[in-house]
């Protein structure tokens, strides 16, 4: 059973999302990572506000796995800086868990397959090839 997020969870997720984007992009710039854009696409906070799942989108995408590894290894520093920024809004900083949001890549693959030669919308005969016998 999936419960919908409460207003409080959404509000805290929004605060974390905004501040995390600034912290991560600032750290990337200070770290000498030129031409890399890090955006925080979603922050889901658990009901007890102890864990925040952070979904990141990285451009260019080929840098995402290496960058995620670096972010995960620096989670305590990121959490500390975030706590300093939100100390007037949150009593306790949730633990941060970072994930790559690959939804844009997924959409891109769908678009490429639709633009390709084997487009079942344009050529319905291709659907017969895909049906199981």
Image (tube, rainbow, N blue to C red):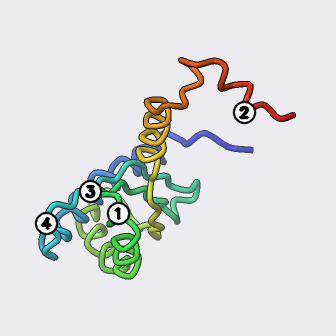
Secondary structure of the residue carrying numbered label 3: helix
For label 3, the crowd category at 10 Å Cα-Cα, with few meaning under 14, some 14 to 19 and many 20 or more, is some
Secondary structure of the residue carrying numbered label 4: loop
Looking at marks 2 and 1 on the same chain, the residue that comes earlier in the sequence is marked by 1
Asked whether disc 4 touches disc 2, contact meaning CB atoms under 8 Å apart, the reply is no
Pointer 1 residue: 62
Residue 124 percent coordinates (x, y):
64, 18
- Per the model, the C-alpha gap separating discs 2 and 1 is 31 Å
Residue that appears at 40% across and 51% down:
12
Looking at marks 4 and 3 on the same chain, the residue that comes earlier in the sequence is marked by 3
Pointer 4 residue: 34
Looking at marks 4 and 2 on the same chain, the residue that comes earlier in the sequence is marked by 4
Return the mark for residue 130. 2
Residue 119 percent coordinates (x, y):
54, 27
Residue positioned most to the right: 133
Q: Is residue 71 above or below residue 122?
A: below
- Per the model, the C-alpha gap separating discs 2 and 3 is 43 Å
Q: Quadrant of the C terminus?
A: top right
- Per the model, the C-alpha gap separating discs 1 and 4 is 14 Å
Pointer 3 residue: 21
């Amino acid at each position: 059973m999936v419960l919908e997020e409460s207003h409080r969870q959404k509000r805290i997720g929004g605060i974390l999302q905004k501040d995390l984007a600034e912290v991560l992009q600032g750290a990337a710039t200070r770290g000498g990572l030129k031409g890399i854009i890090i955006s925080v696409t979603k922050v889901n906070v658990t009901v007890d506000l102890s864990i925040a799942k952070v979904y990141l989108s990285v451009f260019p995408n080929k840098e995402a796995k290496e960058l995620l590894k670096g972010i995960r290894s620096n989670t305590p520093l990121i959490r500390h800086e975030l706590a300093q920024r939100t100390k007037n809004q949150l009593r306790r900083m949730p633990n941060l868990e970072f994930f790559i949001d690959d939804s844009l890549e997924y959409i891109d693959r769908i678009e490429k397959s639709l633009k390709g030669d084997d487009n079942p919308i344009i050529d319905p005969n291709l659907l017969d090839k895909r049906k199981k016998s």
